[in-house]
Image: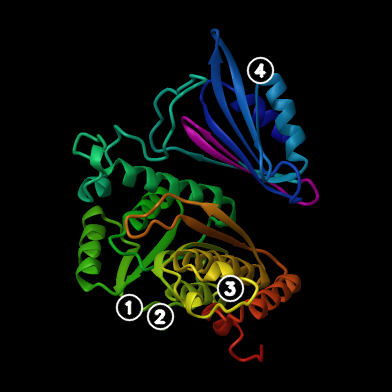
Amino acid sequence: MERLQELLNQILNISLVQGIISNPRTKEGILKIKVRPVEKKGKLYFHVESFTKTQAFHENLVAEDASKRILDYMDNFRQMQIEMRDANYTVLISKKGKVTIQKKHRKETLKEVELSHNRSKKYILQEGAAVPFLQDLGVMTSEGKIVRSRFDKFRQINRFLEFIEDILPQLERGRELTILDFGCGKSYLTFAMYYYLHELKQYDIRIIGLDLKREVISHCNELAGKYGYEKLTFLVGDIADYEDVQAVDMVVTLHACDTATDYALAKAIGWNAKVILSVPCCQHELNAQIASDVLAPVMEYGLLKERFAALVTDGLRAKYLESQGYDTKVLEFIDMEHTPKNILLRAVKTEKNSVAARRKIQECETFLQAGPTLGKLLYQDKRR
């Protein structure tokens, strides 16, 4: 770890923007760590925030102690992303402990880092820095100020980019990555994803947005051309029938209605996509199927049955993803303008399928007398 120690000695200073330690070797205990500089009573500290599945822990350490803490953490982690004012670093650690450090200089040096301990929320896309697509979409003024009536949209875009930031360790560098956005609509988040990954993080990506609305797709293509986003393309098409690519690295499906989400997830699994981000909505299918004598007293109330069916639908989708070898999390998003639903499924491909997940799915579906579309798509050649 000598190389890592040398790097920490170099970066733990006032020019550090943030460090993110991720990709743990075990799924218990601390799963993620964030580090940033703070100033207290005129002295420089480093705020170390560590996360388990259910808790977050905070401590402020001087540079020497922060370095020791980070080195201790790295015994159980494979990756660290370091963002400095003038450069970005990626630290990779192999199973045998080999340390690889990649450095990429920024095109422009960032302004001074905000060191206030109780600083306000730092968004990935910040107010004051003009972003062309946000201006054309009515979220930002020409001076870079957020339109007050569109601040919820601004927060939603940044929250989505935080999910993208979390899965950066899963995205390879050195080759073109293909990302599909099913049901892209007006494409606020599609443009944000391209801007963040291509412009800010310098990934070589190709993003394809798919939707059924021709006028919307035409307008999005015009904007992509206006910004010079050569590898951002929008197409008119249906999720279930799309066959124009052979391999996909990440699939995004936001507010795809009812079983359209199932078709998108099945496509993503079929492509062996490394990452899947899905915000389902309008889960009607199981509402018409669920039948249980045990639950009958509750299911008599239409509103309760509707909500229960929606939760079961997304819970089974998460389990189906697990059964196909995905480490799946059910996370809270921000309500979208199309729907009050705010559940996001985040799935990252692993090496092993889960037989246990498949068994739990069968038991649940038997109890509820229900059979969701995703299961039929995944196992259409097998008897259930």
- Residue at (49%, 21%) from the top-left corner? 118
Residue at far right of view:
96
Q: Residue at x 42, y 75 (%)?
A: 260
Q: Could you tell me which secondary element the residue under label 1 belongs to?
A: loop
* Pointers 4 and 1 in contact (C-beta within 8 Å): no
On the picture, is 161 further left or further right than 215? right
Residue 208 visible from this viewpoint: yes
Find disc 1 in the rendering and name its residue.
237
Magenta segment range? 81-97
How far apart marks 4 and 1 lie (CA) works out to 55 Å
The residue to which callout 3 is attached is 296
The answer to whether 244 appears left or right of 377 in the picture is left
User: Mark on residue 242?
Assistant: 2
Q: Are marks 4 and 2 in contact (CB under 8 Å)?
A: no
Magenta stretch: includes residue 91: yes
| Mark 4 or mark 2: whose residue is earlier in sequence | 4
Please identify, in this view, whether the residue under mark 4 or under mark 3 is nearer the observer. 3
Question: Which residue is label 4 attached to?
Answer: 62
What secondary structure is marked by label 2?
A: loop
